[in-house]
Image (cartoon, rainbow, N blue to C red):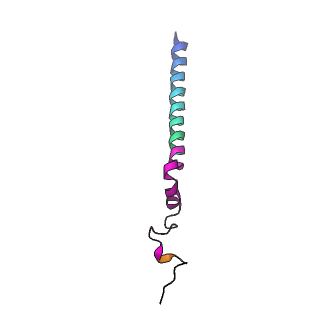
Amino acid sequence: METPNRNRRIFITVFILFVALFIYISYDMSSRTTAPWNKPKQLERALPGALPEKDTLGIDSLLKEVK
């Protein structure tokens, strides 16, 4: 009667470890990817300050000051 109990305990332990590993990998992958509706924000998160401000008239190279 000892072996079925021992085998069951081993199975439960391996199952819990497998599920914990799967949850960890899923969380890690989801934290490294970007949802499709957040794609415009991806560059700002990757390289803060790389994007111009929302009001780009001040840095537009085509606009020249008329005197």
> Is 61 one of the magenta-colored residues?
no
Range shown magenta: 29-57
Farthest left residue?
A: 55
Q: Is residue 37 above or below residue 66?
A: above
Q: What is the x, y in percent for residue 16?
A: 50, 29
Q: What is the x, y in percent for residue 63?
A: 52, 79
Q: What is the x, y in percent for residue 58?
A: 46, 77
Q: Residue at x 53, y 40 (%)?
A: 26
Q: Residue at x 51, y 21 (%)?
A: 9
Q: Is residue 45 above or below residue 61?
A: above
Among the 4 quarters of the image, the one containing residue 11: top right
Q: Nearer the viewer, residue 46 or 3?
A: 46
Q: Nearer the viewer, residue 6 or 22?
A: 22
Farthest bottom residue?
A: 67
> Is 54 one of the magenta-colored residues?
yes
Q: Is residue 63 above or below residue 50?
A: below
Q: How many numbered discs? A: 0
Q: Residue at x 49, y 67 (%)?
A: 49
Farthest top residue?
A: 1
Q: Nearer the viewer, residue 3 or 50?
A: 50
